[in-house]
Image (tube, rainbow, N blue to C red):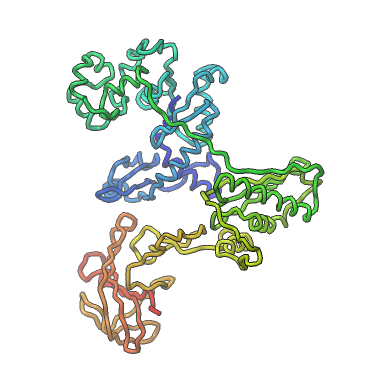
Amino acid sequence: MAIWLPRLAIERWQHAERSAAGEGLNAPNRSAIVALIEEAAHGPRIAAVDGAALAAGVSPEMRLTDARVLCPTLRAVPGDPGGDLAFLRRLAAWAQRWGPWTALDGHDGLLVDVGGATHLFGGESRLLADARHCLARQGLTARLALAPTAGAAWALAHYGPEGAILPDASLRGPGEDGGMADALACLSVAALRLDDEVLLVLRRLGLKRIGDLARIGRDALRRRFRQPSPELNPLMRLDRLLGRVAEPLLPIELVQPAWVQRRLLEPIRHREALEHVLADLAGDMACELERRGEGARRLELGLWRVDGDVAMRSVELAAATRDPAHIARLFGARLDAIDAGFGIELVRMRAVWAEPLGPGQADLDTRTARRGTTLAECLDRLSVRLGAGAVRRPAVHASHIPERAQAWRAPPMPDPDSQGLSDPPGRPLKLLDNPEKIAVLYATPDGHPHRFRWRGHVHEIARVEGPERIAPEWWREKGSTRLRDYYRIEDSEGRRYWIYRAGLAGDGRGGLPDWFLQALYG
């Protein structure tokens, strides 16, 4: 079964926006006209659009500048191909409800092996109906198809009628298509998943349908297309489509997260007993993580009460660890608000996020064991005590505008091999919350000021270095946004400032340039 999700990227973004706004999955989409963009050689390009943008004439592969001409109110949002791929992997694991294994099909589709499982759903038609219903409940637009081979299923999902089914009876034996060629003859040659240049050559030769290839001898096609790559060789793709040659697929492997549990002989209600169980459970989790060569980054603790109610607690760690004492201490701080009711009979811990972590050398002499707390452990304790949003660290942001070049992010700890924040030399480390306007008392039209007034004081400029010109982010801002010329200046008393001129005289984007002070040195 082939599952094609043509609007995966935009629908995943819409779902995230509704979740952030506290709306349900089926809530009406009241957002502005939105397009997801990606960086290209000649500037940002449209990667995906919503229905409103499509109705306004904006389409994928269009340059953002051209799209803004058609729709000036278009909201451009950077795409997240990595997040889309991670979501597709999770969806592939979820789709194993319909077959024993699944595989990714590019960046927007899945292949599910449903051989021998269709009768469990009442037949092939009901299987497709169930898959369509389940995907619609997830808010995903999907095109589905069933066929004996992966290539045929892909072709029908992309170029055939919706819900097309090609029964297994059409594939009768090795080397025989048993009618598959006739059933797929009307499809475009693009259904063979060939390179664009090969498709262009085939169309110029008048071969527009799969059936057209059958009317030409294989020897003629073999002489014309000798490439060993399937994307460049129509014969190889045709043989895989018809099942004459096996097509290699890479199934998704489900990696179960590390988990441990304790079933209690008698329900417990007191905190002391629960802390003892928690310490034992943390030790079991440390042993399991060590066996896997991993360290936990996010842990979940579930407590099952006698009455069937479940209390869940989770902690996220700044760095991968499998220290049982640290894990038990973090969860111990989250037990105050738990109501044990008539007692807790099952405690389970899962490492829902783990990273590779090599074995560490313990101290041979316990008397010389280290004292104190590491930075990662300190961040974990502060996050548990103050809340997940209270601990932040500066991180580099993809922007050349100074106030946007850094952002505050939640831990993890930065990679020790990374170089950290990489500001250009000469820039101040700290900026004002908002640039403050200054009055320039004397300035040449295109030069630096000789004297300026800021916060009621007049400053005589003794030294100047610059300018450093920074252009606006035209793909993110309005066309009237002016460029900036930055100067590093020093006044007569030795105080240093970072100022900039917004715009140039006669640039056609406003009147005279404005001057702002954005940072102080030292």
User: Is 442 placed above or below 103 here?
Assistant: below
Residue in the foreground of this view, choosing between 107 and 24 = 107
Q: Residue at x 52, y 25 (%)?
A: 99
Residue 483, horizontal then vertical, whole percent: 27, 65
Q: Residue furthest bottom?
A: 493
* Image side of residue 100 versus residue 340, left or right: left
Residue 378, horizontal then vertical, whole percent: 59, 64
Quarter of the image with the C terminus is bottom left
User: Is 211 placed above or below 463 here?
Assistant: above
Q: Residue at x 35, y 81 (%)?
A: 496
Q: Residue at x 48, y 34 (%)?
A: 252
Residue 118, horizontal then vertical, whole percent: 53, 19
- Residue 459 image-quadrant placement: bottom left
Total numbered badges shown on the rendered structure? 0
Residue 258, horizontal then vertical, whole percent: 60, 43
Quarter of the image with the N terminus is top left
Residue in the foreground of this view, choosing between 463 and 258 = 258
Q: Residue at x 38, y 78 (%)?
A: 521
* Image side of residue 397 versus residue 258, left or right: left
User: Is 231 placed above or below 83 here?
Assistant: above
Q: Residue furthest front?
A: 364
Residue in the foreground of this view, choosing between 135 and 374 = 374
